[in-house]
Image (tube, rainbow, N blue to C red):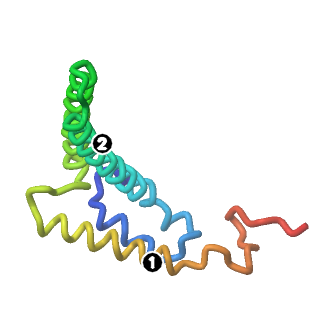
């Protein structure tokens, strides 16, 4: 199964089940990829904002030129990253309802992960990375 081509909402449904089960972990790389990409996009946006503010507070012509060039590169990076995310189905800036559904599914997944017992008392499950008893 190719998780990159599956809609993110479909991948998120798997976290409802046992998170230690290999079958339910299949969609996790896609979820992680989309999360990392979104975090990177937000960092790029912050960089654009900071760069633009720095240009207005810089007196040196050489520093301003450097910052303008950096701003141009950062805006280009934002465009490339946005396009990648749209092609993957992780970002829908022109379809508000679809983006809302993705954001809602992300929030539900975060709540489900927060509710998981990440440190169960019994780690003797066969077939998983159980902690040996010493």
- Is the N terminus in the top left, top right, bottom left or bottom right quadrant? bottom left
Which residue ends up furthest to the right in the rendered image?
134
Task: Confirm whether residue 80 shows in the render.
Answer: no
Q: Report which quarter residue 71 is drawn in.
A: top left
Front in this rendered view, residue 87 or 65: 65
Q: Residue furthest front?
A: 59
In the image, what residue occupies the spot 49% across and 76% down? 114
Image quadrant in which you'd find residue 79: top left
Pointer 2 residue: 47
Up-down relation of residue 115 to residue 95 (above or below): below
Judging by the rendered image, the residue that carries numbered circle 1 is 112
Packing grade of label 2 (10 A; few <14, some 14-19, many >=20) is: some
Closer mark to the observer between disc 1 and disc 2: 2
Which residue is at a point 39% across and 72% down the rendered structure image? 109
Figure check: 110 above or below 8: below
Residue at image point 25% right, 28% down: 67
Q: For the point 8% across and 57% down, which residue is it?
A: 94
Marks counted in the figure total 2
Residue placed most toward the observer, 51 or 56:
56
Task: Give the crowd class for mark 1: few <14, some 14-19, many >=20 residues within 10 Å.
Answer: few
Say what secondary structure mark 1 lies in. Answer: helix
Q: Quadrant of residue 81?
A: top left
The quarter of the picture where the C terminus appears is bottom right
Is residue 21 in sight in this rendering?
yes
């Amino acid at each position: 199964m190719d998780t990159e081509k599956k809609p993110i909402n479909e991948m998120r449904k798997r976290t409802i089940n046992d998170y230690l089960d290999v079958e339910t972990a299949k969609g996790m790389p896609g979820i992680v990829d989309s999360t990392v990409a979104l975090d990177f996009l937000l960092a790029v946006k912050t960089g654009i904002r900071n760069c633009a503010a720095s240009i207005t507070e810089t007196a040196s012509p050489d520093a301003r030129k450097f910052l303008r060039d950096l701003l141009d590169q950062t805006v280009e990076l934002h465009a490339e990253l946005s396009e990648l995310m749209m092609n993957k189905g992780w970002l829908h800036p022109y379809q508000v309802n679809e983006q809302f559904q993705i954001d809602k599914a992300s929030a539900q997944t975060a709540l489900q992960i927060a509710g998981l017992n990440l440190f169960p008392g019994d780690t003797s499950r066969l077939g998983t990375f159980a902690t040996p008893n010493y």
